[in-house]
Image (tube, rainbow, N blue to C red):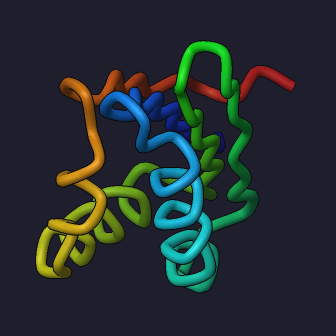
Amino acid sequence: MSIVIMQTFKAAEGRYEDLARVIAAMLPDTAARPGAEFVHAAGDPASATVTVYQQWDCEKNQRDYAAWRATTDVSPLMALLGGAPKIEQLSQLF
């Protein structure tokens, strides 16, 4: 069963466009990882949030991705946040 990860990032004041640009630059690496079935992002300028939707073929590949991502430099992303990201893990229903 596929695993869905929803990550919502709130931009620091005045940094929404920068946040969207940094996330867009990071997503091709995410999509290229083994098991990534679907990786997209959507944004809301009014709330200064970007939500990333990832669908993985199995939990192991998602965990492997998360471990890999933890070894990369995410400081450009973190510098643009106005708070902690909201992260949810869901099971694909259909």
Q: Nearer the viewer, residue 93 or 65?
A: 65
**Residue 81 picture quarter:** top left
Nearest to the observer: residue 35 or residue 85: 85
**What residue lies at 25% left-to-right and 68% top-to-bottom?**
76
Q: Is residue 2 left or right of residue 34?
A: right
Residue at 56% of width from left, 40% of height from top? 3
Question: Is 7 positioned to the left or the right of 20 in the image?
Answer: left
Quadrant of the image occupied by residue 60: bottom left
Q: Residue at x 26, y 71 (%)?
A: 69
- Can you name the residue that lies furthest to the top here? 47
Instruction: Tell me if residue 5 comes above or below residue 80 in the rendering.
Output: above
- Please state which of residues 13 and 51 is positioned toward the viewer in this rendering: 13
Taking 64 as reference, is 7 above or below it? above
Q: Residue at x 58, y 50 (%)?
A: 17
Instruction: State the image coordinates of residue 47 (x, y, percent, origin top left).
Output: 57, 14
Q: How many marks?
A: 0
Give the quarter of the figure containing the C terminus. Answer: top right
Q: Nearer the viewer, residue 5 or 85?
A: 85
As drawn, the residue found furthest toward the right would be: 94
Q: Quadrant of the N terminus?
A: top right
Q: Quadrant of residue 38?
A: bottom right
Where does the image place residue 71, in percent across and percent down from the top left? Answer: 12, 79
Where is residue 8? Give x, y as percent: 47, 28
Q: Is residue 58 above or below residue 72?
A: above
- Expressed as whole percent of the image width and height from the top left, the position of residue 34 reads 54, 81
